[in-house]
Amino acid sequence: MDLSQEKDIDFYGRMRRKFKTRAAVFFSELHSPIPQEFNIPLSNTFSSISLLYQTSKKIETHLHIDPLELKLLQEEYSKDPYFTNILEELSKSESFKGYHLSPDQLILFQDSLGRNRLCIPKSMTSSIMNETHDSIMGTAHVGFKRSYARIANSFYWPGMSRDIRSYITTCPTCQQIKHARHLPYGLLQPIPIPSQPFEVITMDFIGELPFSKNYNTIFVLVCKLTKFTFFIPCTTNLTEEQAARMFFDKIVTLVGLPKQIISDRDTQWRNNFWKEVCLATGSKRALTATYHPQADSQTEILNQTIKVAIRAFINSSRDNWVDLLPYLSFAYNNTPHTTTKFTPSFLLYGFQP
């Protein structure tokens, strides 16, 4: 820090008063005082007065450690597996991957900024974080970034970023005194449990898939109560009228008309035709919104399951997945579900096929 090049006289006055304070003895040692004489034009009354300032050419930072703490650090180094290996390497050479020994045989780590940071064994990291984060003379319960910057200025240990973040996020005092910067959490709004199979259904499309027998999409329908599923091949250019016809021919004729239909906002579901169909049949249409997993998340998870199964059994030409759907449907419906602990077929038919 070169102060001799500065031209602001008030700056020298402030620095002189600062170095005379009691706090200066804890962080600085001044070397090579250089007298500087400045002739400043003043009024006629003070024309013969010149100002003399002594400035510093160098500031050094010294780290003082209590002898008991020094002995404790040396003992903990020998118990820490990581720093034990570092000590073995330093016994062969003066430095190793940024590590070197101080005259007191303490391990120092030189970071990319050139700072020599004292290495702390794993057993002593909690006390360092406590003294820094929880102390009124430390960081006084500030956030992660400022606490990390304060600790990293003097200390180092492997994984310190993770440890400091974990310590701060679990600090009980911070949990009690800090402001919440988000809206109050809303209550969960789960869908009521249906009273009978296929009273409430969820449906979605899986696409676009490679063409197989002129199909490139799978229509997926799940019973909300039993988790029984239907996999029906179709195409991406399916119109709303065709989607309604497929729904009646493949679903309604087998299990009846549901009271509630839950789906995403695909164009096949949200147009006026489907609205009129639901009104005419007495069904309720429920279109989901983003970030509402209580709605049709079971269908989204099922989509992932079917995609994985298709990848496992599809041929090299990737054109036989339509032939696989009946087998995959049978396998899924006859496997115990993680939610009900029963197979969907047993809950629907009352026996295991």
Image (spheres, helix red, strand yellow):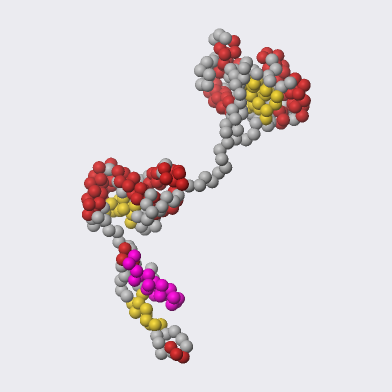
**What x and y, as percent, mark residue 157?**
34, 47
At 60% from the left and 21% from the top, the residue drawn is 193
Q: Of helix, strand and loop, which mostly describes the magenta segment?
A: helix
At 59% from the left and 13% from the top, the residue drawn is 348
Magenta residues span: 3-23
At 59% from the left and 19% from the top, the residue drawn is 225
Whether residue 323 appears in this view of the structure is no
Whether residue 14 appears in this view of the structure is yes
Q: Nearer the viewer, residue 201 or 221?
A: 201
**What x and y, as percent, mark residue 56?**
35, 72
> From the viewer's perspective, is residue 304 above or below residue 229?
below
**What x and y, as percent, mark residue 87?**
25, 48
**What x and y, as percent, mark residue 253?**
70, 14
Quadrant containing the C terminus is top right
> From the viewer's perspective, is residue 5 above or below residue 352?
below
The image quarter in which residue 299 lies: top right
Q: Residue furthest front?
A: 177
Reply yes or no: does residue 6 show up in magenta: yes
